[in-house]
């Protein structure tokens, strides 16, 4: 296997060469945008489901400076690498990674914020590498299992955040509603100004606030540089933009 350099952030590094899914823009956007209106001192516990390399969990540990952050990951090599990344970070005393399926995860605590960059291809051919296949396909974690777990672990006033292809919205939100989770916010992610949004960040909670708030972020300008809004979102984490 070719050596892959760790992904360098401003405050931490993320080794990801053993992970089923590498560090990517989807995950970094979720780590930056989730619960952005929540006061830092209101968050004591955070959970990242399917943490992979742990990059999203590390971003949340950076943002919520008093919070204990747990990651859970079913893929063994990814879980080990996340543990190492947590251990080597400035937030190591507040971070734990559990190697097990979320369906078997039992904690005597509830979470203020739960995040997930979940599997999203619920059908279709899988890759020969089962780790990558599990990360990209809902082989071990379909939407129903995910939202059932979230509903059981979320505090009454907590929030759940996930990033998905926009065309998976209806199936995901139907599953969430069945478990008493209501859509409060949608952030539409457009790759370019003249393109349709291809990813959405969904914010849900156990409170039905009525009409969900919508906003849009465009990632790239015409010259392939980051837009000013993307720069604002990611600049607390990226060394250079």
Image (tube, rainbow, N blue to C red):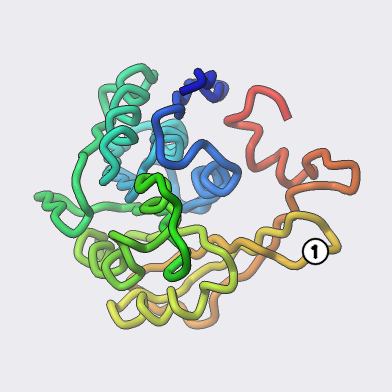
As drawn, the residue found furthest toward the right would be 223
Q: Which residue is rendered at x = 80% and y = 44% of the image? A: 227
Q: Is residue 217 left or right of residue 208?
A: right
Q: Is residue 46 above or below residue 216?
A: above
Q: Nearer the viewer, residue 119 or 2?
A: 2
Residue 58 x/y as whole percent: 42, 33
Please tell me whether residue 201 is drawn above or below residue 208 in the rendered image: above
Q: Position of residue 161 (x, y in %)?
A: 44, 58
Q: Which structural element holds mark 1?
A: loop
| Quadrant in which the C terminus is drawn | top right
**Residue 199 appears in which quarter of the rendering?**
bottom right
Q: Residue placed at 80% from the left, 64% from the top?
A: 195
Residue 86 pos. (x, y %): 33, 26
Locate residue 23 relative to residue 46 in the image: left or right: right
* Residue 157, quarter of the rendered image: bottom left
Is 157 displayed left or right of 237 in the figure? left
Residue 158 figure quarter? bottom left
Would residue 190 be seen by someone viewing this image from the given angle? yes
Which of 61 and 144 lies nearest the eye of the viewer?
A: 144
Image coordinates of residue 143 in percent, x first then y, are 35, 69
Please report the residue visible at 26 percent of the width from the left and 52 percent of the height from the top. 111
Residue for badge 1 = 195
Q: Is residue 16 left or right of residue 147?
A: right
Tell me the residue at 41%/41% (across/down): 20
- Residue 42 in view in this figure: no
Q: Nearer the viewer, residue 76 or 71?
A: 76
């Amino acid at each position: 296997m070719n050596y892959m350099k760790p992904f360098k952030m401003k405050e931490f590094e993320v080794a990801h060469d053993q992970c089923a899914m590498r560090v990517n823009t989807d995950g970094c956007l979720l780590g930056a945008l989730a619960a952005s209106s929540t006061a830092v001192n209101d968050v004591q516990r955070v959970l990242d489901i399917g943490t992979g390399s742990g990059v999203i969990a590390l971003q949340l540990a950076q943002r919520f400076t008093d919070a204990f952050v747990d990651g859970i990951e079913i893929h063994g090599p990814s879980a080990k690498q996340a543990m190492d990344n947590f251990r080597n970070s400035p937030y190591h005393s507040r971070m734990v990674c559990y190697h097990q399926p979320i369906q078997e995860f039992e904690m005597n605590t509830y979470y203020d914020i739960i995040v997930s960059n979940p599997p999203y291809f619920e059908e279709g051919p899988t890759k020969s590498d089962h780790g990558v296949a599990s990360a990209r396909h809902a082989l071990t974690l379909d939407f129903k299992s995910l939202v059932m777990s979230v509903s059981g672990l979320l505090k009454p006033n907590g929030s759940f955040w996930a990033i998905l292809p926009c065309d998976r919205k209806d199936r995901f939100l139907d599953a969430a509603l069945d478990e008493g989770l209501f859509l409060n916010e949608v952030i539409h992610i457009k790759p370019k100004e003249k393109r349709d949004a291809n990813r959405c960040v969904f914010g849900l909670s156990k409170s039905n606030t009525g009409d969900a708030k919508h906003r849009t972020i465009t990632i790239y300008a015409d010259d392939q540089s980051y837009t000013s809004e993307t720069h604002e979102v990611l600049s607390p984490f990226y060394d250079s933009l």
